[in-house]
Image (cartoon, rainbow, N blue to C red):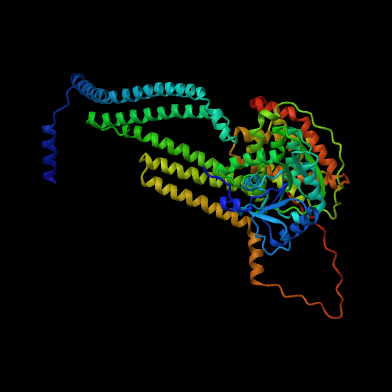
């Protein structure tokens, strides 16, 4: 059986030592690593700290930070399953009480943000601390359109960035994630995406969200939206499918009791005409495929949307929620090839983006619109539960 | 001339009038009856010769279907008893097919048995036909080839649909206006290829099929090439112009102070 316990026994013996906190730093350029070491040295001075990284630490100006090497991986974005396995293995070897995972570009995080994440786990006794980034309204759109609303509606979690690339984990949460990630590695999928929030919700572990302010989010190595949307959405759908027994039960969303930093404002305008045109072209050509996936009401809604002027273009929140749920059901039923399914979702996603940008252009706050979308997903949860259980009932 | 007339007279003298039709009808019906009897005899002989083969097909198919049903039932019971699904899900939580692993294995065993029965039956039929009858009938060889042809046709249709959808979705996402046309072209390319392969497998048509296939395939490719080429005409011409005539660098006249141009602000959309 393949394993990703990539730190050799000799290395582990040589470096095994107790450390309250193990910081796993994803592969990144040397200058970013140096900056992160500086932040860690400043914020965790005098504390037992161990860094596990595949980067070469020689040459950094912080020799006081102890480093254990882990195997280099090809994963660039997001944090891959094999990275979780390596981090958890190093944490076990060194009897760490908590693990701080820092993704690529974490040097742009404020040092106090690192402290906030760690404190949430070590002092507030959360099992999973995820950052709340302050991104521009035009960034993280896949998260706003699909990942956040779906996670909130199905797993009853208010975490705004379920696919965050930085996080702090308690030891038991790290073990849980490590086990999940190990299964992916065993299936020869070392670069698979692991979804910490849904894992924590299913395991009944506590989650905390920490305001970390702005951060430079790394962009995927493959800039093609088609490939990346398929990768992320496909992984999320597969995760939802695997946890169907959990989310079909009704759950109450905990009330929001914290305020986060205001988002940076938008400057300039985006030309949404190409996105609207892409949607119209798809509506003309993909009727046959959408007809296999979408319920008749959703198709009718798209038909109405296809004749709307670009200036007034806006996808209704309920329609968008039903469209995503229909695609989720089709993913489960394998109504069409899953690659085709994800490809057919792209024009619809672009239509949502165009509508979202129009809403922003009208002066509405981006978070208000995203929250409205998430609320629509919540209110339509009964629809997905019904379709999941009786898919054929909605085909007439 | 005199010789010719002499020959004609001799012919007329030697001419025997045909017997009345009432006298000859007996022999005509006898011939027809004989021909029919021989034909029926031949067909019945052939039928009797291939009957064991046909029966062998049905017996083999029925027998192996029953075996498959029994095996499927047995597998389902055994796998349920050893909790196979739960064990597999523990090792692989990302099981995605809509049916359980036990059901898939049971169905696989059933259809494997059916397929085995079909193959054995057809082999038996083939053997009985080739050894049991001396009378060739041109349709019979197709019965054994028909299975292969049907499989080729099914595979071709599935591949055509898959490729057509792939091209359609890819072209739509690339915002090509002729996406549907491209998709249809690819679909018919594969279907024409499949049809030619099926006919070739059945040995129908011979050269005509090859010729027709070549013409159709070439025609579709040419049509697609023209469509794509004409559709991308502007793009190609712009590209060629850009390469052939590099733009001269503009140097503002010294007396004119260039005004600072206000850049058009297009906030970049970041999907992630």
Q: How many marks?
A: 0
Which quarter of the picture shows residue A195?
top right
Residue A360 image point, x, y percent: 84, 46
* Residue pictured at 33% horizontal, 32% vertical: B139
The quarter of the picture where the C terminus of chain A appears is: top right
Q: Taking the image as drawn, is residue A320 in sight?
A: no
The image shows residue B27 at horizontal and vertical percentages of 18, 21
Please report the residue visible at 48 percent of the width from the left and 26 percent of the height from the top. B106
Measured along the vertical axis of the image, is residue A391 above or below residue A256? above
> From this viewpoint, is residue B73 visible?
yes
Residue B242 lies, with reference to residue B78, above or below; the image says: below
In percent of the image, x 66 and y 30: which residue is there?
A244
Q: Is residue A291 above or below residue A363?
A: above
Nearer-the-camera pick, A322 or A141: A141
Position of A134 with respect to A151 (left or right) is: right
Viewer-proximal residue among B89 and B204: B89
Q: Nearer the viewer, residue A185 or B263?
A: A185
Q: Position of residue A260 (x, y in %)?
A: 86, 44
Task: Say if A231 sits above or below A252 in the image.
Answer: below
The percent coordinates of residue A388 (x first, y second) are 66, 28
Relative depth, front residue between A41 and A279:
A41
Q: Is residue A236 left or right of residue B79?
A: right
């Amino acid at each position: 059986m393949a394993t990703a316990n990539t730190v050799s026994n000799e290395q582990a013996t040589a470096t095994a030592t107790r450390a309250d906190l193990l910081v796993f730093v994803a592969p990144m350029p040397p200058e970013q690593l140096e900056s992160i070491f500086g932040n860690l040295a400043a914020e965790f001075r005098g504390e037992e700290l161990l860094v596990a990284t595949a980067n070469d630490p020689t040459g950094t100006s912080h020799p006081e930070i102890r480093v254990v090497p882990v195997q280099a991986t090809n994963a660039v974005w997001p944090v891959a399953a094999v990275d979780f396995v390596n981090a958890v293995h190093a944490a076990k070897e060194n009897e760490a009480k908590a693990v701080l995972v820092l993704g690529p570009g974490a040097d742009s995080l404020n040092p106090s943000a690192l402290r906030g994440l760690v404190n949430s786990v070590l002092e507030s006794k959360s099992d999973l601390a995820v950052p709340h980034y302050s991104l521009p309204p035009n960034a993280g759109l896949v998260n706003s359109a699909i990942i956040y609303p779906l996670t909130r509606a199905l797993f009853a979690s208010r975490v705004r960035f379920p696919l965050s690339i930085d996080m702090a984990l308690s030891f038991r949460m790290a073990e849980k994630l490590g086990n999940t990630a190990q299964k992916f590695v065993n299936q020869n999928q070392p670069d698979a995406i692991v979804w910490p929030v849904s894992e924590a919700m299913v395991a009944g572990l506590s989650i905390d969200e920490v305001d970390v302010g702005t951060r430079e989010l790394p962009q995927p190595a493959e800039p093609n939206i088609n490939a990346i949307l398929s990768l992320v959405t496909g992984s999320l759908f597969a995760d939802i499918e695997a946890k169907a027994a959990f989310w079909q039960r009704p759950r109450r969303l905990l009330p929001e009791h914290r305020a986060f930093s205001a988002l940076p404002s938008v400057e300039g305008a985006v030309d949404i005409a190409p996105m609207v045109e892409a949607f119209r072209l798809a509506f003309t050509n993909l009727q046959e495929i959408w007809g296999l996936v979408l319920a008749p009401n959703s198709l009718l809604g798209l038909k109405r949307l296809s004749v709307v002027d670009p200036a007034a273009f806006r996808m209704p929140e309920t329609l968008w929620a039903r469209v995503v749920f229909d695609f989720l059901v089709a993913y489960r039923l394998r109504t069409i090839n899953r690659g085709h399914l994800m490809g057919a979702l792209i024009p619809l996603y672009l239509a949502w983006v165009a509508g979202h940008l129009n809403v922003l252009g009208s002066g509405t706050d981006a978070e208000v619109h995203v929250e409205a979308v998430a609320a629509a997903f919540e209110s339509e949860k009964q629809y997905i539960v019904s379709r999941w259980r009786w898919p054929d009932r909605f085909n007439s | 001339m005199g010789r010719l007339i002499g020959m004609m007279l001799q012919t007329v003298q030697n001419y025997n009038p045909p017997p009345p039709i009432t006298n000859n009808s007996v022999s005509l019906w006898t011939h027809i009856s004989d021909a029919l009897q021989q034909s029926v005899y031949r067909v019945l002989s052939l039928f009797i010769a291939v009957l064991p083969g046909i029966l062998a097909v049905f017996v083999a198919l029925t027998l192996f279907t029953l075996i498959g049903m029994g095996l499927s039932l047995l597998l389902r019971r055994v796998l349920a008893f050893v909790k196979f699904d739960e064990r597999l899900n523990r090792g692989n939580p990302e099981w995605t097919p809509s049916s359980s692993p036990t059901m898939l294995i049971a169905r696989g065993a059933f259809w494997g048995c059916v397929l085995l029965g079909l193959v054995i039956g057809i082999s038996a039929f083939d053997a009985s036909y080739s050894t049991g009858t001396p009378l060739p009938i041109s349709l019979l060889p197709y019965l054994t080839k028909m299975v292969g042809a049907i499989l080729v046709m099914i595979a071709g249709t599935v591949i055509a649909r898959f490729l057509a959808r792939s091209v359609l979705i890819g072209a739509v996402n690339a915002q090509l206006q002729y996406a549907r046309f491209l998709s249809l072209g690819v679909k018919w390319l594969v279907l024409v290829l499949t049809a030619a392969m099926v006919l070739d497998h059945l040995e129908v048509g011979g050269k005509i099929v090859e010729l027709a296939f070549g013409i159709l395939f070439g025609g579709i490719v040419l049509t697609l090439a023209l469509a794509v080429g004409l559709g991308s005409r502007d793009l190609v011409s712009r590209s060629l112009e850009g390469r052939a005539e590099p733009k001269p660098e503009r140097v503002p006249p010294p007396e004119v102070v260039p005004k600072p141009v206000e850049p058009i602000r297009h906030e970049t959309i970041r999907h992630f």
